[in-house]
Amino acid sequence: MSKGEPGLQKILYVEDDADIRAIAELALQDVGGFTAALCSSGAEAIEVAPGFQPDLIILDVMMPEMDGPRTLQELRKLEATRDTPAIFMTARIQRTEIDEYLSLGALGVIPKPFDPMTLADDIRRLFTEHA
C-alpha cells in the first residue's frame, strides 16, 4: 500500500525502453510501495489495463507503433480506464507539447531522465494536486 494515498495504489507504467522500465519498476515498487504493471508498448497496455484496473497510468510519450498520446486515447475507449488519471513522461519538455498532453487529460508531465528516489513523490504530488 502506498504512503497515505488511498486512491493511489496500482500504477500501469508504459515504456518501450527495457532499462528505463527496470529502473521505474524499482522506483515504483521498492521505493514507492506501489503495485505496478509494466508494459513495453501501447498495445500491451491496452491488453493489460482492463484486468489490472490501475489507479493511475504513466506513459512514455515517444514509443514505436503507438505513442503515448495515442495509447491514452485508446485506453480512454475502455470502460476500465475511461476515467483513470494519466501522467506522461518524456525527455522532450517543450511548453507547447506539455499543453498538448494536458489537453488530452494528463495530470502532468514528468521529465526524463527521472530520479528513481523521488519518482514516487513526484507521482503522488501530481496525483494529489488533481484529486
Image (cartoon, helix red, strand yellow):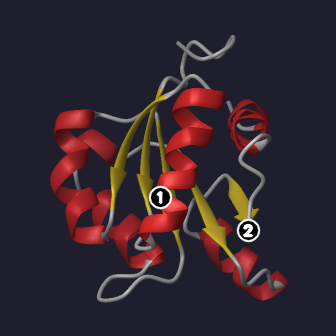
* Picture residue at 63% right of the left edge, 66% below the top: 89
Residue 113 in the image, given as x and y percentages of width and height? 73, 68
Q: Residues within 10 Å of mark 1 (few under 14, many from 20)?
A: some
Q: Is residue 37 above or below residue 10?
A: below
Residue 44 in the image, given as x and y percentages of width and height? 21, 62
Residue 15 in the image, given as x and y percentages of width and height? 44, 66
Q: Badges 1 and 2: C-beta atoms under 8 Å apart?
A: no
* Picture residue at 22% right of the left edge, 52% below the top: 78
Is label 1 in a helix, a strand or a loop? Answer: helix
Residue 21 in the image, given as x and y percentages of width and height? 47, 58
The residue indicated by pointer 1 is: 21
* Picture residue at 50% right of the left edge, 66% below the top: 19
Q: Tell me which label, 1 or 2, sits earlier in the chain.
A: 1
Is label 2 in a helix, a strand or a loop? Answer: loop
The answer to whether any part of residue 86 appears in the image is: no
The residue indicated by pointer 2 is: 113
